[in-house]
Image (tube, rainbow, N blue to C red):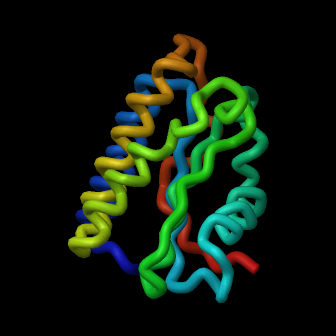
Amino acid sequence: MFFSEAEKEKIVAAITHAEQNTSGEVKVHVEELCTGKDPFERAKEVFLYLSLHKTAQRNGVLFYLAHGDRKFAVLGDIGIDKVVPANFWESTRDTLRMYFLQGNFSEGLQMGIKEAGFQLKKYFPYQKDDMNEISDDISTEPIP
């Protein structure tokens, strides 16, 4: 695995914390290579494969990282895209890029997840009956 156990725990904790403020669902998927594809296109494939489009409010978010290619993407579902401004993900991507350029992938994901949770809270506030629809663990399974 690309991350140490301590780094994985911190990333999962960032997801859990972000989801305490929003009904949005956050998932991180890490693989070595984008399989020769554009990272955003690869993130779409991963998004569908992991069934992130099956949340009740269609408010799933995928943080995709291909560490060997040094590429990443942030992808939100259509429920998010319908209500947020066009530049909604720019600050989150900028945060990730800043950390990733320094080789701080774990910290970058933690800060990006925190930023996404903060932003999503405005449009998808946490509800007392909210259920965790997507596992908070980091996905690393090989995806065709």
Q: Residue at x 63, y 44 (%)?
A: 76
Query: In x, y percent, where is residue 122?
Result: 48, 18
Count the labels in the image.
0
Nearer to us in this view, 69 or 27: 69
Nearer to us in this view, 121 or 10: 121
Q: Residue at x 72, y 29 (%)?
A: 82
Residue sticking out furthest to the front: 86
Q: Is residue 140 above or below residue 17?
A: below
Q: Is residue 135 above or below residue 122?
A: below
2 with respect to 136 (left or right): left
Query: In x, y percent, where is residue 118?
Result: 39, 29
**Quarter containing the N terminus:** bottom left
42 with respect to 98 (left or right): right
Image-quadrant location for residue 55: top right
Image-quadrant location for residue 45: bottom right
**Quarter containing the C terminus:** bottom right
Residue sticking out furthest to the top: 128
Query: In x, y percent, where is residue 33?
Result: 55, 85
Nearer to us in this view, 75 or 26: 75
Q: Residue at x 46, y 32 (%)?
A: 19
Query: In x, y percent, where is residue 57?
Result: 72, 27
70 with respect to 9 (left or right): right
86 with respect to 113 (left or right): right
Q: Is residue 89 above or below residue 96?
A: above
Q: Residue at x 34, y 40 (%)?
A: 114
